Amino acid sequence: MNEFSGELQQMFKDYGDFHSEVDSSPDFMPRLWANIESRRSPLFAMQRMARFLVAGAMAAALIMGAVLTPLMESKRPAGHYADVVARNDTKVDQEYASTLPLDEAPRQ
Amino acid sequence: MLIDPAVVVKARAGDTAAFNQIVQACRKPILGTIRRLIGNADDVEDVAQEVFVRVYYSLDQLRSEDGFEAWLYRLTVNSAYDYLRRKKRRQESRMSDLAEEQVTLAEAAAGAKFSADEGRKAKARELVESLLSEVSEQDRILLVLKEVEGLSLKELERIYEVKENALKVRLFRARQRVLKAFAEKDKAK
């Protein structure tokens, strides 16, 4: 048999005819609705959890913002960036220079 | 299995009576299709339950009410495929399936007057089931839809959402594998 025809095709058709009458049990619909509801519940629980997590994250961000902002403000150096760098450099230079012997002072 | 598109629209809008109407109308043909796709009578209802739960939760993804039947077939095929893969993973041996089939046949033979025609059909059923168990789940589903359900290539194209030529190639290969299995069985006789 080189082709999918004749006997083999008839056998497949008979196979279909044999299983043509299949019916469900009487509790098919109640079971179906129970299945639908059981899947709906975890879905709702996950949505509720997701909403709770989002609200929690927003509250935490607000609290952290309210607490940390004044703290960061107080530690922020006064003046512009260039002034602060210049002031720090001068301080470091003076400290560095004071450790050096006079005859080995850095060349200008 | 003709569903009024208006009923589908209502069901999509959350009308439970319309959804029940769809299930009532489609239940029997879907159960028959699943029976032929999975080849195991015990689990037909469980797979059908899965199909209709998927219908309920995916109705809003249906693009057009007119395509409902092809879409329902698609969900059925997907559920049957998932079942067959799970079954394979559980490594239920083919021998036990075959034994189950033989027991059913023996019971049928003992309990009824077995005419020659019935006997021929029972043998054909046994052989087809055994041939389908020799090929992959994909081949099995495609062959059942084409050769047993009698769907046209156009209908298969709508279910699989692939081009007709690609389907023809798949079908040709699936048939070749069944023919090979058939030839081997013939040789073993």
Image (tube, coloured by chain):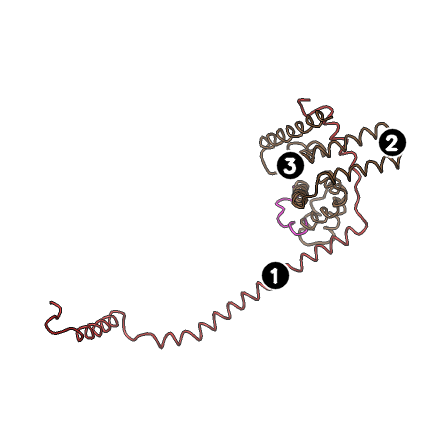
For image coordinates 75% across by 47% down, the residue present is B45
Q: Is residue B61 magenta?
A: yes
On screen, residue B63 above or below A68: above
Where does label 2 land, which residue? B114
| Chain at numbered mark 1 | A
Give the secondary structure at mark 1.
Answer: helix
Q: Is residue B17 magenta?
A: no
Does residue B66 appear anywhere in the picture? no
**Residue A25 visible in the picture:** yes
Image colour for chain B is: brown
- Single out the mark in the foreground, 3 or 1: 3
Same chain for marks 1 and 2?
A: no
Amino acid type indicated by mark 3: Ser
- Answer with mark 2 or mark 3, whichever residue precedes in sequence: 2
Q: Main secondary structure of the magenta part?
A: helix
Eyeballing the image, is A6 above or below A18?
Answer: above
Q: Which residues are magenta?
A: B55-68
Residue marked by disc 3: B136
**Cβ atoms under marks 3 and 1 closer than 8 Å:** no
- Residue at image location 85% in from the left, 36% down from the top: B108
Q: Front-most of A28 and A18?
A: A18
Q: In the image, residue B83 lies at what x, y percent? A: 68, 45
Secondary element at image label 3: loop
Question: Can you say whether B189 is above or below B49 in the image?
Answer: above
Q: Which residue is mark 1?
A: A46
Left or right side of A12 for B71 = left
